[in-house]
Amino acid sequence: MASFISFSETVEVNGETVMAIVSAMAGFEAIAQQLFRKNGIVDVEPGKWYSQQNWLNVFRDIKDKLGDKSLLVIGKAIQENANFPSEIDNLEKALNSINVAYHMNHRGGEIGYYRLISYDSNAQAAIMECKNPYPSHFDRGIITAMARKFKPETALTINVELDTNSPTRLKGADSCTYIIDWREKSNDY
């Protein structure tokens, strides 16, 4: 399944999650509202539910009008707006929580998943697979925001990159794989 096409026409996304676009598009709220109306999303409110396909259509329009970097920014805004489990206190839990949050914020049919494939604190690396209808840059934004917020206390930097050696939605695949790695602070600093 390609990006921007819901796995099921019955899937809905909650208003809290939809509001992430408005939050992420500070300064471009009028464009966001115009794209919402164009795609049948009106009166966005927390607690209400909206067609995922209509929301995905908004994503496609944002990509066409503003580019992939805008999708990355919106992905980064998700963790500030969507519902997430409250017991997150480390990077491994944070990465696992993305799938839990995804299911908390969507309903009504097959939605796909975010799966932590591996996590190795000694190697300072993790691998995450995302099989869903969202654009790759959006998923990278979500993972990046969670990784930065919950990076290990001893980490100096953390990086999230699309694994271009694996199948990606950018090339028509059903999923994308992301490599998360971090570097520990040195005692030399």
Image: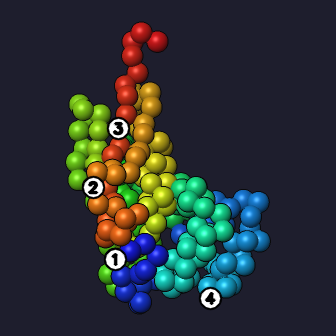
- Image location (x, y in percent) of residue 72: 54, 56
**Which of marks 2 and 3 precedes in the sequence?**
2
Q: Mark 1 points at which residue?
A: 1
Q: Residue furthest top?
A: 188
**Which of marks 4 and 3 precedes in the sequence?**
4
To which quarter of the image does residue 32 belong? bottom right
Q: Are marks 3 and 4 in contact (CB under 8 Å)?
A: no
- Image location (x, y in percent) of residue 120: 23, 39
Q: 138 left or right of 93?
A: right
Q: 147 left or right of 60?
A: left
**Which of marks 1 and 3 precedes in the sequence?**
1
Q: Residue 40 carries which label?
A: 4
Q: Distance between the residues labelled 3 and 2?
A: 17 Å
**Which of marks 2 and 4 precedes in the sequence?**
4
Q: Nearer the viewer, mark 4 or mark 2?
A: 2
Q: Are marks 3 and 1 in contact (CB under 8 Å)?
A: no
Secondary structure under the numbered disc 2 in the rendered image: loop
Point 38% across, 51% down: residue: 162
